[in-house]
Amino acid sequence: MTKRVYVIASFNPDGKVMPLWLRLSLDKGAPNYKIIDCKCLSMPNRYANYADFRCLAVAGQHNHEVTLRFYVQECRWYLTVNNSSPLAAE
């Protein structure tokens, strides 16, 4: 499942990005997920205008392994999880 999500990220002077927090919706009361570990799998290049990240996100006592894709030109984030993940239902 792929879904647009809202991310707080850090950008360094070289333009590299690292996601810090994740939110599935802007609805009041929607949970925030702290990204405690993240690895950049791919950066934008001449063939793809996005960066992929493999992250471990935590909310309360629950850990979720997710893949985030950041489209640089549109400044949009997308979450990919398998359909059996609890995040797929949210």
Image (spheres, rainbow, N blue to C red):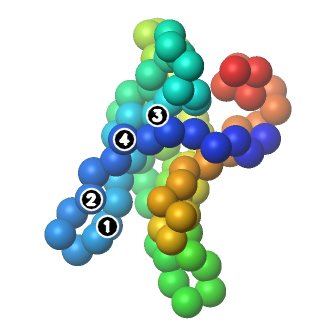
Instruction: Report how far apart the C-alphas of labels 2 and 3 lie in the structure.
Output: 15 Å
Q: Which residue position is annotated with label 3?
A: 22
Q: Which residue position is annotated with label 1?
A: 16
The 10 Å Cα crowd at callout 3, few under 14, some 14 to 19, many 20 or more, is many
Instruction: Report how far apart the C-alphas of labels 3 and 1 lie in the structure.
Output: 18 Å
Which residue is at the far bottom? 46
Q: Look at the numbered disc 1 and give the secondary structure of its residue.
A: loop
The 10 Å Cα crowd at callout 2, few under 14, some 14 to 19, many 20 or more, is few
**Is residue 71 found left or right of 15 in the rendered image?**
right
The 10 Å Cα crowd at callout 1, few under 14, some 14 to 19, many 20 or more, is few
Which residue is at the far right? 83
Q: Amino acid at mark 3?
A: Leu
Instruction: Report how far apart the C-alphas of labels 4 and 3 lie in the structure.
Output: 7 Å
- Which mark is first along the chain, 3 or 2? 2
User: Quadrant location of residue 66?
Assistant: top right
Across and down, in percent, residue 1 comes to 78, 41
Quick check: marks 1 and 2 in contact, CB under 8 Å? Answer: yes
User: In the drawing, what numbered circle is on residue 11?
Assistant: 2
User: In the drawing, what numbered circle is on residue 8?
Assistant: 4
